[in-house]
Image: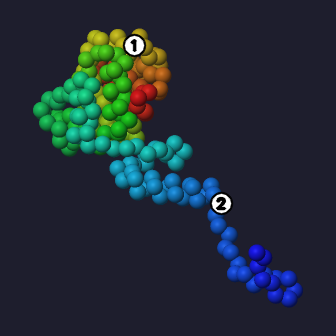
Amino acid sequence: MKSPTVPGGTSTAPKRRRHRTTGTRVRSVVTALALVAAPGAAVVGSAGDAFAATKISHATATSMFRDVGITWSSSGNCSNRNNSTCTSFDQLNLATAQGAQTLKRASGCALNITGGTETGHASGTYSHWNGYKLDFSKYTCVGNYIKNTFTYIGVRGDGAPQWRSGSGNVYADEGNHWDVTYHNCGGC
């Protein structure tokens, strides 16, 4: 049925407002859902490389580690994030915990974590405090796996030799432990 018209050919039907395009609506809905569904996510990095990093609790991380046989220890026998003698996983990135699980499964080696998100480590965007790094005990099995599986990329500014996995995670030999930077879960 046609809209009624007035003399001169113009419609008397109310004018419809133009709606946003479907792409804009979808983008708005996705943004809103991301903000509502991911309250534990934080945006990190620069504007050019920003992404959301899902943070997990100490209890969640220890459960994930226990599930695959990863152990952890601290010189202070504690898990307080604000005590440098503790080993804490509070505010660890989910991808970091998954990366440790991937290393354990792929290597088949014993893994013991000696450093997590506790204070006392070097600062920076991809730091322990920000949830990107874990320190592992320097066992022969895991050392052989890293050196024989990943690509040697040279020494870090502090002289630590480094290897990069195919997924981009970096394993630095700091002498008495492995300092691992997880940019992703390593193929989880």
Task: Please state which amino acid type lies under the numbered disc 1.
Answer: Lys
In the displayed image of the protein, which residue is found farthest to the left? 77
Q: Secondary structure at mark 1?
A: helix
Task: Please state which amino acid type lies under the numbered disc 2.
Answer: Thr
Q: Is residue 98 above or below residue 147?
A: below
* Residue placed most toward the observer, 21 or 145: 21
Dot 1 corresponds to which residue? 147
In the displayed structure, does residue 49 sit left or right of residue 79?
A: right
Where is residue 78? Give x, y as percent: 14, 36
One can see residue 135 in this view: yes
Quarter of image, res 143: top left
Residue at 29% x, 15% y is 109
Residue at 44% x, 17% y is 150
One can see residue 118 in this view: no
* Residue placed most toward the observer, 175 or 171: 171
Dot 2 corresponds to which residue? 21
Residue at 27% x, 25% y is 68
Where is residue 97? Give x, y as percent: 32, 33
